[in-house]
C-alpha cells in the first residue's frame, strides 16, 4: 500500500515516455487533508538539482498538498531553464488539482545535465492525475525506480487513544547523503495529527539514524530528497516521541531495502563502531571503512582482511590508541589490541550479511554505518549506465 | 640503473622465499659515502607498520648507511613482536656491513597482520649483501615489486660547476598518502653534496607535488615510505633549488610510472583544478573527483559524465559558486557555468590518457591530482589478492 496506506492519501504512477524502456516514470502523491503539514530533508550537495531548489522553497511554510516525482531525468545542472521546467511541472499539477504551485513539491532522478522533455512530462502528470486512487501507492513506488530491481515500500501502524494511525512510505535508490548508485527519493505519509514543525524535527531524527547512515559507495547525489506529509485524517495525535519512533521505523525499513537492492552488491555490511569517544567519532570511523575500496573488494572476495579495516580507520581523526583497537568480523575477533587476534580462517563470509565490529576502547558511544561490497557487477553497471 | 646510477651506491635484489611465487623479495641499498645524509617521508596512517616506526626513529639524526626492503609481508599490525622483527632485520644487515643498526632503515610491503618468516628474511639479507654491486639497482627495483607488472626506476643527471651529479630512484606500488592498491615504497639516491636538513626539505617539496598527488583509489597504506640518501661522491654541491628540481623530476617520473601500472586500470586521469582560491581548495576538489567511484566507473566505460564531476566537487568546501564552474574533458567544455555546455558526444575517451579540467572561477591557484579509473580488473585483483 505504500504511501496510500494512511487515510486521506491518493497516488498514481504512469509511463510518460521519459524512460526509453517504456517503464513507469511519473508518480503523483496527493494529500486530501484535512491538514497539510509537511517536512523534508534534502541533499547537502552544493549542486542541488532544480527540483531540490524548488521543493526547498515551497517547503518553507511547512505545508504541501502534493508531490510529483519523475525518473528518467534528474534535471540537475540544467541552469535557469531547468529550474523553469521544474516550476512549470509544479504549476501543471497544481492546475490539474485546483491548487497553487506553492502546494506542490517536485523530485526527479536520472541522468544529470540533460533537460527534461516537458511535453511528455506534463502529459504524464495529467495522466497520473486521472489515475489517482487510494490504492495507487504501489504504482507510485514503481514509477520512481531507476536501477532498482524491486519497489521499496513500508507501512507502520500504531495504536492510539483515538484509534490507530499509520505511516506509509516509498523509496528508490540506495542511500542518502552518501547514496549508493543513484539518487535516493523517499516519500513518507501519515494520517497522524501533527504540525509541520514537529514533523520536521521527527523526520530529521528519523533520517539521521537510518538513511543517512547508509553509505553504499560514498557518492552524494544532487537530487536526494525525503519528504513527509501529514494530514491528521486519523484524528489521533501521537506524542513527538511516538511520531519519531514510527518515522524512524519506516525510514529504517526503507533504508534496509535500499541496502539489499544496491546495484551489483553481494554483501550487506553493518559496520558497528563501539566505545567511541563521541557518536561523530563512531560515524567517522565507520564511514572510513564504508568508503575504502580495498576493504570493499576484499569482502566481495570473502576475504576477512582486517588489516584493511585498521588502514581505513587509521586515516581518521577519531579518538583511539592504535594498540587498543579490536576488530571482529562475523563474531571472530581477528584483531586484538591493534595486532593479530584469532585466526582469520574462522570467519565465515559466505552469506550476504557481514557484521564488522570495531571496538575503539576510547569512550562509551556507539553507531552503525551500513554499506555494500564493491563488486564486478557494480563496476559493470555503473560504467554502462549513464546516470 | 635505478638507485645505483649515482656514484658510491651499491644494491642487490634476491629471492628469499617470502613470496610463494619464488620471485625476488629482498632488496638492499648501501651508501658507500663519503657522506651519509638521509631524509624520509612516511605514511600518515595512524597504524604505521613496524618498519615505518623503526625507520622514523633511525632517521631522526638525518643519517643512514643502508636500507633493507622486503616484499611478501608488510609487518603491519603485528604488535611489539613485529617491531622486534624489524629491529632484528636492521641488526642483521648492520652486522653484515659492519655498521650500527641505527644506520639502517627498513621498508616492507605485503599482507597486513602477518608475522614475517625471520629465518628466510635474514638468510635473504645475507644473500643480498653477497650480491651487492654498483649495477645492482635494477635487481633491487625488481625485488620490491608486489602486484606491479614492471619495475619502476628513474635516473636524473644534472651538470654542475664541479662536474655532473645524479639522482637515481626506484619505486613500487601506486600512490602515496592515498596509494592505489598496495604500499608505495620509494628509494632515491644522489651523489650530490647536501646536508640532511636540506635534503629533507627538498624531499618534502618533491613528494608534495608528485607522489602525494597520485590518488589512485583513495586508500592510505600503513607502510608508505620514501627515503632519500645522499653521499656527496660527485663533489658537486647543487643549490637547494637545483636539488629540489632534480628530486621533483625523479619523484614525478616514478609517480607517472606508478599511475600507468596501477592494478587493473585502463585510464590515467589527470584532474586539473584551476582558478581556485587556494592550492588546498584545488587539491580538495581534485581528490573528491579522484575518489568518486561513480565518476571512475563512468570513465572506465568511456562515458564523459560531467554531472558526476560536479556531484563530486559539490561535496567539498572548496570556494566556488555553483553557477560559475566550467568542466572540460579531453578539451571539450561539456559543462559551462554549472550547466550544460558543448555536446558530450564530442569527447573522445578511447585512449588511456584522460584530462579533466575544472575551472572554479574563484581565484588564481591551480593543482593537478592524478588517478585511475575503477575497472572490473581492479575489483577482480583486489578481491582475489590478500594484501
Image (cartoon, coloured by chain):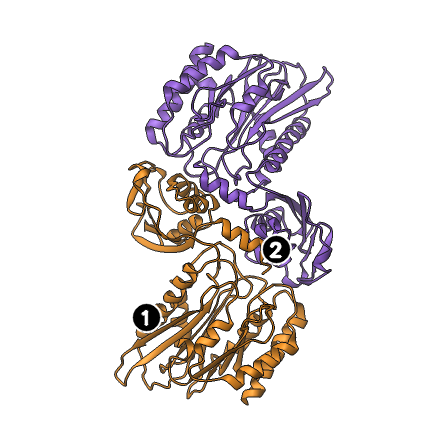
Chain colours: A purple, B orange
Q: Determine which quarter of the picture holds residue A159.
A: top right
Q: Which of the pair A39/B101 is nearer the observer? A: B101
Name the residue rendered at 57%, 55% in the picture.
Answer: A312
Secondary structure state at the residue bearing disc 2: helix
Name the disc covering residue B245, or none.
1
Q: Residue furthest left?
A: B161
* Label 1 packing within 10 angstroms: few (<14), some (14-19), many (20+): some
Quarter of the image containing the N terminus of chain B? bottom left
Image position of B254 (left or right of B148)? left
Secondary structure state at the residue bearing disc 1: helix
Name the residue rendered at 67%, 58% in the picture.
Answer: A325
Q: Residue furthest bottom?
A: B98
User: Which chain is mark 1 on?
Assistant: B
User: Image height check: is A285 above or below A2?
Assistant: below
Give the CA distance from mark 2 to mark 1. Answer: 37 Å
Name the residue rendered at 37%, 31% in the picture.
Answer: A114
* Label 2 packing within 10 angstroms: few (<14), some (14-19), many (20+): many
Pointers 2 and 1 within a single chain: no
Query: Where is residue A211 shown, x and y percent of the image?
Result: 58, 36
Query: Where is residue A216 shown, x and y percent of the image?
Result: 56, 42
Q: Determine which quarter of the picture holds residue A343.
A: bottom right
Query: Where is residue B212 shown, x and y percent of the image?
Result: 43, 61
Is residue B189 something that shows in the picture?
A: yes
Is residue B208 something that shows in the picture?
A: no
User: Image height check: is A106 above or below A300?
Assistant: above
Q: Which of the pair B151/B60 is nearer the observer? A: B151
User: Image height check: is A328 above or below A225?
Assistant: below
Name the disc covering residue A309, or none.
2
Q: Determine which quarter of the picture holds residue B208.
A: bottom left
Quarter of the image containing the C terminus of chain B? bottom right
Query: Where is residue B126 shown, x and y percent of the image?
Result: 58, 84
User: Image height check: is B237 above or below B113?
Assistant: below
Amino acid at each position: 500500500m505504500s504511501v496510500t496506506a494512511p487515510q486521506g492519501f491518493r497516488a498514481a504512477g504512469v509511463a510518460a515516455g521519459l524512460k526509453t524502456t517504456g517503464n513507469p516514470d511519473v508518480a503523483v502523491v496527493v494529500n486530501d487533508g484535512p491538514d497539510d503539514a509537511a517536512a523534508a530533508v534534502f541533499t547537502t550537495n552544493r549542486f542541488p538539482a532544480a527540483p531540490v531548489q524548488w521543493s526547498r522553497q515551497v517547503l518553507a511554510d511547512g505545508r504541501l498538498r502534493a508531490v510529483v516525482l519523475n525518473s528518467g531525468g534528474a534535471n540537475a545542472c540544467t541552469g535557469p531553464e531547468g529550474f523553469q521546467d521544474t516550476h512549470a511541472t509544479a504549476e501543471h499539477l497544481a492546475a490539474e488539482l485546483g491548487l497553487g504551485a506553492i502546494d506542490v513539491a517536485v523530485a526527479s532522478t536520472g541522468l544529470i545535465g540533460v533537460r527534461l522533455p516537458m511535453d511528455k512530462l506534463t502529459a504524464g502528470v495529467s495522466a497520473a492525475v486521472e489515475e489517482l486512487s487510494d490504492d495507487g501507492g504501489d504504482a507510485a513506488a514503481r514509477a520512481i525506480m531507476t536501477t532498482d530491481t524491486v519497489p521499496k515500500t513500508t507501512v507502520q501502524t500504531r495504536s492510539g487513544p483515538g484509534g490507530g494511525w499509520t505511516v506509509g512510505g516509498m523509496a528508490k535508490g540506495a542511500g542518502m547523503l552518501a547514496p549508493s548508485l543513484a539518487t535516493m527519493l523517499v516519500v513518507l505519509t501519515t494520517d497522524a495529527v501533527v504540525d509541520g514543525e514537529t514533523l520536521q524535527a521527527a523526520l530529521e531524527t528519523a533520517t539521521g539514524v537510518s538513511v543517512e547512515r547508509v553509505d553504499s559507495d560514498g557518492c552524494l547525489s544532487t537530487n536526494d530528497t525525503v519528504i513527509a506529509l501529514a494530514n491528521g485524517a486519523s484524528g489521533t495525535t501521537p506524542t513527538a516521541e511516538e511520531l519519531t519512533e514510527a518515522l524512524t521505523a519506516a525510514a529504517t525499513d526503507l533504508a534496509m531495502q535500499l541496502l539489499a537492492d544496491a546495484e551489483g552488491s553481494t554483501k550487506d555490511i553493518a559496520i558497528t563502531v563501539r566505545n567511541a569517544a563521541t557518536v561523530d567519532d563512531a560515524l567517522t570511523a565507520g564511514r572510513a571503512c564504508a568508503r575504502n575500496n580495498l576493504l570493499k573488494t576484499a569482502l566481495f572476495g570473502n576475504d576477512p582482511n582486517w588489516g584493511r579495516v585498521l588502514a581505513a580507520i587509521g586515516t581518521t581523526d577519531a579518538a583511539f590508541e592504535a594498540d587498543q583497537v579490536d576488530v571482529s568480523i562475523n563474531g571472530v575477533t581477528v584483531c586484538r589490541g591493534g595486532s593479530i587476534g584469532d585466526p582469520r580462517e574462522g570467519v565465515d563470509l559466505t552469506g550476504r550479511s557481514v557484521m564488522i565490529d570495531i571496538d575503539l576502547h576510547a569512550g562509551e558511544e556507539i553507531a552503525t554505518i551500513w554499506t555494500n561490497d564493491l563488486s564486478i557487477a557494480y563496476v559493470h553497471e555503473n560504467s554502462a549506465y549513464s546516470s
